[in-house]
Image (tube, rainbow, N blue to C red):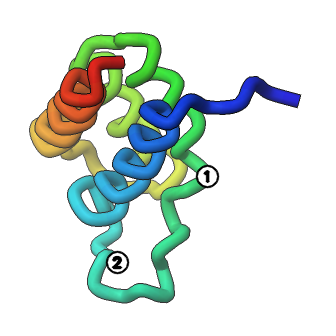
Amino acid sequence: MGAKLTKKQLELYERLDEILFYKWDPIGINSDCLGRDEYRSYLPKIFQLVLEGESPESVAAHLTELAKTSMGLSSQSEHDLAVAKIMIGVREYLEL
């Protein structure tokens, strides 16, 4: 079994889930609550990258790769970088 998350880590995890759905949303489903869990399978790795202090560019590269390989979409690297910066900002805000 994995280690239990601290309260701040859990808050980061939940906020990253929200950011993926409402801000990243490469397939444009955030207006449909039925698709709410669409990006959750990507969350553990993204959480790990953000928590470990990876750079926004590294997190953005991962988001771009997910969109390209898992969803067959074209690159939106500027958007992915903007989203990654939001994610890193949340980690910094939570002082993790």
What is the x, y in percent for residue 51?
Answer: 44, 21
- Element class at badge 2: loop
- Element class at badge 1: helix
What is the x, y in percent for residue 78?
Answer: 10, 37
Q: Is residue 54 above or below residue 80?
A: above
Instruction: Name which of mark 1 and mark 2 comes first in the sequence.
Output: 2
Three-letter residue code for mark 2: Ile
Residue bearing mark 2: 29
Task: Decide if residue 81 is on the left or right side of residue 15.
Answer: left
Task: Find residue 49 and report its image quarter.
Answer: top left
- Of residue 5 and residue 42, the one placed in the foreground of this image is 5
Q: Is residue 29 above or below residue 39?
A: below
Identity of the residue furthest to the right in this view: 1
Task: Find residue 82 and report its image quarter.
Answer: top left
What residue is at 34 percent from the left and 25 percent from the top?
59
What is the x, y in percent for residue 70?
Answer: 53, 50
What residue is at 27 percent from the left and 13 percent from the top?
55
Q: Is residue 46 in view from this perspective? A: no
What is the x, y in percent for residue 79?
Answer: 14, 44
Quadrant location of the C terminus in the rendered image: top left
Q: Is residue 32 in view from this perspective? A: yes
- For the residues bearing labels 1 and 2, Cβ distance under 8 angstroms: no
Q: Is residue 76 above or below residue 23?
A: above
What residue is at 29 percent from the left and 53 percent from the top?
19
Three-letter residue code for mark 1: Ser
Residue bearing mark 1: 41
Task: Decide if residue 66 is on the left or right side of residue 94.
Answer: right
